[in-house]
Image (cartoon, rainbow, N blue to C red):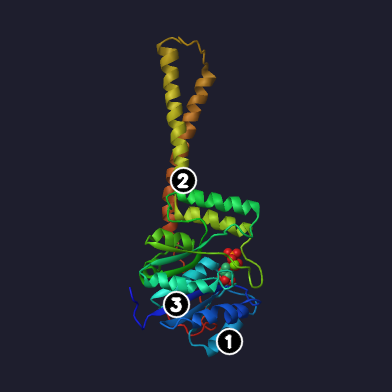
């Protein structure tokens, strides 16, 4: 499908304490690739996620001379996921490409993304073929388990190695902007939205400068968060375990009553009162687990609805070229 001449492509780039590498990223990698896009208008949205170094100042300087630059400056660090959401919400283009600012996602692929979009793709997803690179054994095993579990939970769309390096069509962006949860994993939510995804494989570059702000603790937090925010499966598993215990001990109890008291212990088990009592208690434990999980399910729904704070706070004074939203 040919896109209209006046179509615009928005780039969304979250930045957090990237002062050492951002100039190199922009001058040597990003801007030269963007300059090759001649068919479309461009908009480059930087979301400064409360950097405490010179990052914001540096991109403000770029914005002063380049009208394609827009800056959303957060009042504090809200995290990359929220930063992406803010950028997507402010994007005005017909397609939105999101990418990191550290040079790890090779900028040359934006042309492949755009081509796939021109061919009718609603979502183009960058898949890391080396997604284990640069991580220790435990995060590696963890990420394997994470994707396995996600898939088991019904998130069949989530491909191991899929990243936030993506292009979204305006259709998808409009749907994404309707989502209101606060605990969000951008990838997970986009996968949840559905739509067909075109995959572009790439390898992670080394960081231009600085180091990843995602240590093991942050990654674990992200993983737990995505399970809890994407699904209630853990609760349902709890309910199943409870139901299993309950039903098992119910039949065991029934067996004792029939075998011992009605038939007169033909199996000669001589199960005494203590055994009978523990079977009964096991039954009660199962019952408690089931009711607890059910209650927790209700609470989780209320919790999801009750979160009504704004997703992020923008520092208007520090933002640039931003339309009021
Ligand atoms: N980032 C952000 N807020 C944060 C942490 C990171 O906006 O709290 C940005 C960061 O500047 C970079 C991108 O998110 O552009 C990816 O971060 P990082 O390289 O630390 O993550 P990794 O590549 O290890 O996944
Ligand atoms: Mg990185």
Q: Which mark is residue 235?
A: 2
Q: Quadrant of the C terminus?
A: bottom left
**Is there any visible trace of residue 312 in the rendered image?**
no
Find residue 17 and report its horizontal and vertical position in percent: 63, 74
Q: CA distance from mark 1 to mark 2?
A: 50 Å
Mark 1 or mark 2, which has the lower sequence index? 1
Report the front residue among 38 and 227: 38
Mark 3 or mark 2, which has the lower sequence index? 3
Q: Quadrant of the N terminus?
A: bottom left
Q: Which mark is residue 10?
A: 3
Ligand 1 neighbours mark 2 (CB distance < 8 Å): no
Mark 1 or mark 3, which has the lower sequence index? 3
Q: Which mark is residue 266?
A: none
Find residue 110 and report its horizontal and vertical position in percent: 48, 73
The quarter of the image that holds ligand 1 is bottom right
Q: Could you tell me which residue is drawn at 45 percent across and 9 percent down?
A: 266
- Secondary structure under the numbered disc 1 in the rendered image: helix
Q: Is residue 50 left or right of residue 232?
A: right
Q: CA distance from mark 1 to mark 3?
A: 20 Å
**Is there any visible trace of residue 89 in the rendered image?**
yes
Q: Is residue 135 left or right of residue 265?
A: right
Mark closer to the observer (1, 2): 1
Q: Could you tell me which residue is drawn at 66 percent across and 68 percent down?
A: 211
Q: CA distance from mark 3 to mark 2?
A: 39 Å
Q: Residue furthest bottom?
A: 65
Location of mark 1 (residue)? 61
Residue 8 is drawn in which quadrant?
A: bottom left
């Amino acid at each position: 499908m040919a896109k209209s001449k006046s179509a615009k492509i928005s780039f969304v780039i979250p930045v957090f304490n990237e002062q050492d590498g951002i100039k190199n990223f922009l001058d040597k990698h990003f801007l030269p690739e963007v300059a090759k896009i001649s068919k479309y208008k461009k908009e480059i949205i930087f979301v400064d996620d409360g950097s405490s170094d010179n990052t914001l100042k540096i991109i403000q300087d770029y914005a002063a001379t380049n009208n394609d630059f827009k800056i959303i400056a957060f009042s504090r660090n809200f995290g990359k996921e929220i930063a992406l959401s803010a950028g997507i919400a402010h994007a005005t283009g017909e397609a939105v490409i999101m990418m990191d600012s550290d040079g790890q996602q090779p900028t040359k692929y934006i042309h492949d993304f755009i081509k796939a979009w021109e061919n009718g793709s609603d979502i183009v997803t960058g898949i890391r073929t080396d997604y284990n690179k640069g991580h220790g054994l435990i995060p590696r095993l963890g990420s394997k388990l994470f994707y396995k579990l996600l898939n088991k939970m019904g998130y069949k769309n989530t491909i191991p190695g899929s990243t936030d390096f993506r292009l979204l069509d305006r259709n998808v962006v409009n749907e994404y902007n309707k989502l209101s949860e606060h605990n969000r994993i951008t990838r997970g939510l986009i996968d949840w939205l559905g739509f067909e995804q075109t995959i572009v494989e790439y390898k992670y570059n080394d960081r231009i400068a600085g180091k990843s702000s995602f240590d093991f603790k942050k990654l674990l937090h992200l993983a737990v968060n995505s399970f809890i925010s994407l699904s209630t499966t853990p609760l349902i598993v709890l309910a199943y375990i409870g139901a299993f215990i309950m039903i098992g001990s119910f039949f065991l109890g029934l067996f004792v009553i029939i075998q011992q008291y009605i038939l007169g212990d033909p199996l000669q088990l001589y199960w005494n009162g203590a055994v009978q009592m523990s079977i009964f208690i096991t039954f009660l434990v199962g019952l408690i687990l089931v009711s607890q999980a059910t209650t927790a399910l209700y609470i989780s729904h209320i919790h999801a609805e009750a979160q009504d704070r704004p997703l992020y706070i923008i520092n208007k004074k520090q933002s640039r070229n931003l339309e009021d939203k």
